Image: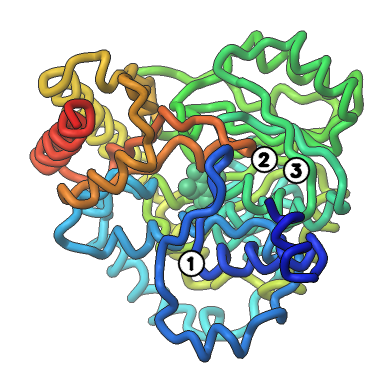
Amino acid sequence: SERALGQHLGISRTTVVTAYQELEAQGLVRRQVGRGTIVCAVAKDPHASFAWQGKVARGALRASDPTLRLLGEISVDPTIISFAAGIAALDLFPSQLFQEITARIWREQAQRVVELGPTDGLLEFRQAVATMMGVRPSQILALSGSQQGIDLIARCLLDPGDSVLLDAPGYLGAIQIFQAAGAHLIGWDSIHADLNELEDLIVRYRPKLLYTTPTFQNPTGHTLSRQTRLRLLELAARYHLPIIEDDPYRDLAFNFKPPPTLLSLDTQHLVIYLGTFSKTLASGLRLGWLAAPESIVNHLALLKGRSDLFTTSLQQLVVTELLRSGIYTQHIKNMQRAYAQRQAAMLGELRRSSPPDLISSFAVQGGLYLWCQLGYGIDARLALQKALQAGVAFLPGEVFYPDGRGQDELRLCFSAIPPSKIVEGVRRLTQALNELRSA
Ligand code: PMP
């Protein structure tokens, strides 16, 4: 144990824990609940690592799972078919139109592109998004991606030691931010959506906020019903609990009309809504927004100003034009159709090439992901190693829980790749799983 190691070396347990956290942050070791610490890489440049030893702040070490960074590396490896990162169908990005609009903006509004922009966002962007959301422009804050919104909210509302209620499984990027803020994370199973259990958790832990992705959730694809939304809002009102509604997937519905947003149903001004163009257009644009009561938007805008001053004006101008011209609405229809086909290809091949007791999943009504259950006691992290050797990647379930659950679960993203490649990737995956089962 860390304590025993500390005693053996004559140093405190805290020093040992911090040292492990630093190694983990550098991707050199990985901690697994119930299995201790595993060495997983050799430092590329040990001298450089040594120079920075002890320099990294405690908050930065608290959430050191290197999975998000690994995702970036995998997604540029051409030999790997990646179902890992949640990426939009970039092959369908309207690049011709985007280039034309960008060129026109440079011709007509070059000064606005290069000058300092307002922290809250350009007025026309806020107006266009406000119209889409049915709120006032002053309730909108432009963001450099909705990830920035989660970070700003954590910095604005949380002190170390505060409790946060969140979907479990839930979005990895949010888990990391809340952990880094020093919060105590309490998972709520939003698939079964037991509101009595939620109320018990609220009473017991008195959380500072509830974070949820209620529509086509990441990672499960699940959507909270209208009834559950209303009851959730009742609880929020009774216990005066702010709700963060993270909603990147709402527009990506397959022949299904999702229930209204929590924001639109809220009468108590307790909801902060996060939206993004990452899953409908492209994450590379780094453009999202937040919609909330003005009083909290103002606090968040101050923090945003301190972090990145303002979000790139060019992207706001181009996307405003896409929204106003109706191109965006048309594009979303294409994406919905394509994502539905991609899900069908993935689910069909999973069912064709493996028995359901090896890997099982269920169809979703929108979004980007299939959430899968592994059989035969197969561990998803082990399966990932095997799958990478076979040339396919996914995300192990464990990273979506704040407490190490999900070892026999995994997430597959079906949106990013055309159907023929999806079929090939699923074959590689099921073959790797079959080999693990017979090993
Ligand atoms: N929230 C959720 C639930 C997500 O799945 C993602 C992206 N995977 C984000 C936020 C971050 O999106 P953005 O690219 O807008 O920062």
Q: Are marks 3 and 2 in contact (CB under 8 Å)?
A: yes
Please report the residue visible at 71 percent of the width from the left and 69 percent of the height from the top: 119
Cα gap from disc 3 to disc 2, whole angstroms:
6 Å
Q: Position of residue 361 (x, y in %)?
A: 32, 20
Q: Position of residue 112 (x, y in %)?
A: 56, 79
The residue type indicated by label 2 comes to Tyr
Question: The residue tagged with tag 3: helix, strand or loop?
Answer: loop
Q: Are marks 3 and 1 in contact (CB under 8 Å)?
A: no
Can residue 399 be spotted in the picture? yes
Question: The residue tagged with tag 2: helix, strand or loop?
Answer: strand
Please report the residue visible at 75 percent of the width from the left and 72 percent of the height from the top: 57
Q: Are marks 2 and 1 in contact (CB under 8 Å)?
A: no
Nearest the eye: 282 or 61: 61
Q: Dot 2, crowdedness within 10 Å: few (<14), some or many (≥20)?
A: many
Which residue bears the numbered disc 1?
28
The residue type indicated by label 1 comes to Leu
Q: Earlier in the sequence, mark 2 or mark 1?
A: 1
Q: Position of residue 215 (x, y in %)?
A: 52, 27
Which residue bears the numbered disc 3?
292
Q: Quadrant of residue 63?
A: bottom right
Can residue 324 be spotted in the picture? no
Relative vertical location of residue 369 with respect to residue 153 in this rendering, above or below = above
Q: Is residue 162 left or right of residue 164?
A: right
Q: Quadrant of the C terminus?
A: top left
Nearest the eye: 359 or 89: 359
Q: Which mark is residue 273?
A: 2
- Applied colour scheme: rainbow
